[in-house]
Image (cartoon, rainbow, N blue to C red):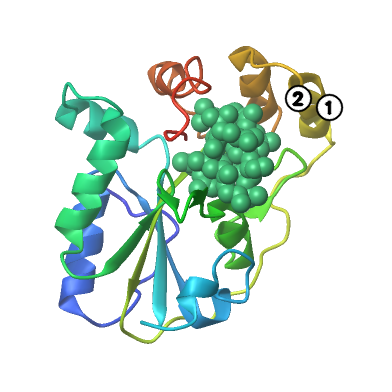
Amino acid sequence: MRRAGTRRVCHGRAVDDALARLADAGFDLAHAFDAHAAAREPGWERLASGPRVGVLIGNTRALWPRFCAARRDEPDPLDRYTERSLTQAYASATIYFAHRTYEGAFLPFSRLAAAVGLGALAPSHLVIHPIYGPWIALRALVVHDGEPPLRAPIPQPCRCDASCATALAAARDTTDWRAWLAVRDACSLRTHRYSEDQIAFHYPTAWERVPSGG
Ligand code: B12
């Protein structure tokens, strides 16, 4: 599988192998950054001490067939699949998951993704990737030793006519998933929209199944 928007994070063979395994499992976004610099972001102070390389792991629509092929009959199957894939790929690194709480709170993955330049936050509050638009999910952060690349926030990738802000205003007071899908669909970058099956998995039950998302 082609790895999307990534660069090698260090020379370590083990790191390359881990990224290849994750790509095979459908986690096709891996964005390395300086974990110590990112520790300045509110909510990420925990990165200040410890290994220097952070790698944000996410996915595009590429996840869907891989996940479906490996899916088990279990509660929150995507979260469990994510955990298994990450821990198998990185046996000894520190891993933080977007769907888990730490000391009672979710970690602000969207703000981290914007701070380290994986994407930019749109008026919809969704992270917009320069290629995949809003059709990405943030799954985990891996922290390991090595030399991090320099990163900076990127400019807004979408040519926004503010239609996502209008859609967000319409969705805010409702739990109707169609209104929330309309927020994502309002983005001008829609070539890499999820498949209907993937959308059906993420949207209609989002409010009953808080940890998952994508
Ligand atoms: C809890 C949660 C939810 C909850 C509550 C969201 C809320 N508004 O309070 C529910 C289940 C309702 C939900 C729904 C959705 N979520 Co959500 N959610 C999360 C989760 C796990 C934690 C958010 C959080 O509290 N962060 C910690 C706080 C401190 O950070 P923060 O940046 O201030 O977080 C705020 C925003 O993230 C915001 N938020 C969360 N999801 C969304 C989605 C939209 C459209 C908006 C406007 C705001 C918003 O709520 C937080 C508190 O105000 C994150 C993953 C993560 N760890 O961040 C995903 C996450 C933000 N969600 C995501 C998505 C896509 C959605 C949905 C659009 C689709 C879906 N079904 O998954 C829906 C619908 C929109 C909505 N009303 O929020 C993606 C965003 C991807 C991207 N490209 O930006 C994330 C990153 C998950 C992922 N795996 O990628 N979500």
Place of residue 101 in the rendered image (x, y in percent of width and height, measured from the top left): 44, 49
Q: Callout 1: few (<14), some (14-19), or many (20+) C-alpha neighbours within 10 Å?
A: some
Upstream in sequence: badge 2 or badge 1:
1
- Label 2 near ligand 1 (CB < 8 Å): yes
Residue highlighted by disc 1: 166
Q: Look at the numbered disc 1 and give the secondary structure of its residue.
A: helix
Q: Callout 2: few (<14), some (14-19), or many (20+) C-alpha neighbours within 10 Å?
A: few
Q: Which of 151 and 213 is in front in this view?
A: 213
Q: In this view, does 53 lie above or below 207?
A: below
Q: Which residue is drawn at 28% across and 43% down?
A: 82
Q: Residue at x 44, y 25 (%)?
A: 209
Residue highlighted by disc 2: 172
Q: Which of 19 and 79 is in front in this view?
A: 79
The quadrant where residue 53 appears: bottom left
Residue 28 - label: none
Q: Quadrant of ligand 1?
A: top right
Q: In this view, does 58 lie above or below 20?
A: above
Residue 127 is at least partly visible in this image: no
Residue 18 is at least partly visible in this image: yes
Q: Which residue is drawn at 45% across and 24% down?
A: 202
Q: Which residue is drawn at 77% across and 24% down?
A: 167
The kind of residue tagged 2 is Arg
Would residue 157 appear left or right of 44 to someone viewing this image?
A: right
Place of residue 45 in the rendered image (x, y in percent of width and height, measured from the top left): 55, 73
- Label 1 near ligand 1 (CB < 8 Å): no
Would residue 145 appear left or right of 178 to someone viewing this image?
A: left
